Image (cartoon, grey):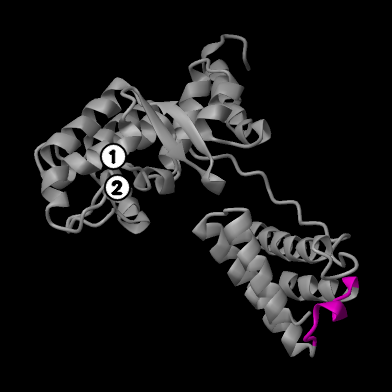
């Protein structure tokens, strides 16, 4: 099958049948687009011409590029290539999968960075409680920390997702839904936003069911949510890097430090595998080790 046709079929598959997020599909399109460009430059126009040696040569060239790609980027690229070839073999478009022996590079294990509890409290208190935008921003920040939601999940919330009082319905990766508690502080902040601010924002734009709205009444974007977090970090005088995932990391770490079971945290975060959640247990163990080393008289 011609490369372009096989590429289009795969993108349709991951979009419609697997229901992957726009972010993930964009990554596939970017990675595989570069792969197809390289294949075309090599004179390969049909998927039947792709052999294990061809794939190996492509990965070797990408690995030795200057500047060298991050191991995580290379692993994602290999995953995209394998996924495409597996799809072609499974659908009977090709007789076998030439990427079967391709193994991703082992990425270095990076522990997530979590804020200390007092830093989180300063961050949440940074937006003004009197300014309408500040009230919205505080509601967003409180909700992110209270639920461990991804930023994309938070800005994708509809007002109706709050209909169950002290729990919240989140839509995660692959459109999977989960129910998480929201907590009294976050609920109070969201209620203040709903009653005092959101009606005025909604009147400025077209009718939208989204919970968080921008200054012109349109749904709040990922970029705007990121700016909210960065502004709050500056206001709280937090010098360490604070990313959109920082409150999610802090949520998980503080739960485990407080004695929560790792499988409960897995459900709250929406992780498909408990192994993904267990990385946070290493953060907690490191904290315990530091406390022990500084507190026990015979630790050293």
Q: Where does residue 300 sit, x and y in percent of width and height?
A: 63, 17
Residue at the spot of label 1: 159
Asked whether, in this view, residue 192 is left or right of residue 283, the answer is left
Query: Spatial distance from mark 2 to mark 1, Cα to Cα?
Result: 6 Å
Q: Nearer the viewer, residue 16 or 238?
A: 16
Q: Where does residue 200 sit, x and y in percent of width and height?
A: 10, 48
Q: Where does residue 57 sit, x and y in percent of width and height?
A: 83, 76
The residue sitting at 66% across, 44% down in the picture is 109
Observer able to see residue 25: yes
Against 247, is 294 above or below? above
Residue at the spot of label 2: 210
Per the image, label 1 sits on a secondary structure element best described as helix
User: Mark 2: few, some, or many residues within 10 Å (few <14, many ≥20)?
Assistant: some
Asked whether, in this view, residue 45 is left or right of residue 174, the answer is right
Residue 236 found in image quarter: top left
The residue sitting at 90% across, 65% down in the picture is 96
Asked whether, in this view, residue 51 is left or right of residue 154, the answer is right
Residue 17 found in image quarter: bottom right
Q: What stretch is highlighted in magenta?
A: 44-52
């Amino acid at each position: 099958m011609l490369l372009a046709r096989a590429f289009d079929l795969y993108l349709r598959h991951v979009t419609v049948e697997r229901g992957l997020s726009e972010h993930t599909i964009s990554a596939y399109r970017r990675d595989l687009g570069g792969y197809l460009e390289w294949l075309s430059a090599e004179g390969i126009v049909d998927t039947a011409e792709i052999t294990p040696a061809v794939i190996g040569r492509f990965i070797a060239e990408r690995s030795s590029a200057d500047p060298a790609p991050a191991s995580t980027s290379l692993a994602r690229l290999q995953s995209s290539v394998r996924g495409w070839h597996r799809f072609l073999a499974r659908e009977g478009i090709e007789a076998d999968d030439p990427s079967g022996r391709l193994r991703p590079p082992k990425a270095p294990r990076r522990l997530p960075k979590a804020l200390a509890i007092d830093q989180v409290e300063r961050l949440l208190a940074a937006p003004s409680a009197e300014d309408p935008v500040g009230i919205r921003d505080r509601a967003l920040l409180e909700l992110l920390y209270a639920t461990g939601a991804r930023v994309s999940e938070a800005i994708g919330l509809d007002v109706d997702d709050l209909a169950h009082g002290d729990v919240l319905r989140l839509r995660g990766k692959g459109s999977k839904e989960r129910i998480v508690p929201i907590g009294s502080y976050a609920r109070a902040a969201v209620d203040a936003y709903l009653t005092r601010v959101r009606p005025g924002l909604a009147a400025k734009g077209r009718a939208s069911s989204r919970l968080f709205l921008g200054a012109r009444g349109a749904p709040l974007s990922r970029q705007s949510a990121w700016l909210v977090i960065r502004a709050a970090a500056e206001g709280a005088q937090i010098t360490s890097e604070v990313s959109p995932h920082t409150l999610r990391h802090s949520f998980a770490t503080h739960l485990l430090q407080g004695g929560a079971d790792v499988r409960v945290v897995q459900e709250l975060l929406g992780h498909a595998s408990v192994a993904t959640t267990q990385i946070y247990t290493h953060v907690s163990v490191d904290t315990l080790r530091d406390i022990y080393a500084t507190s026990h008289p015979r630790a050293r």
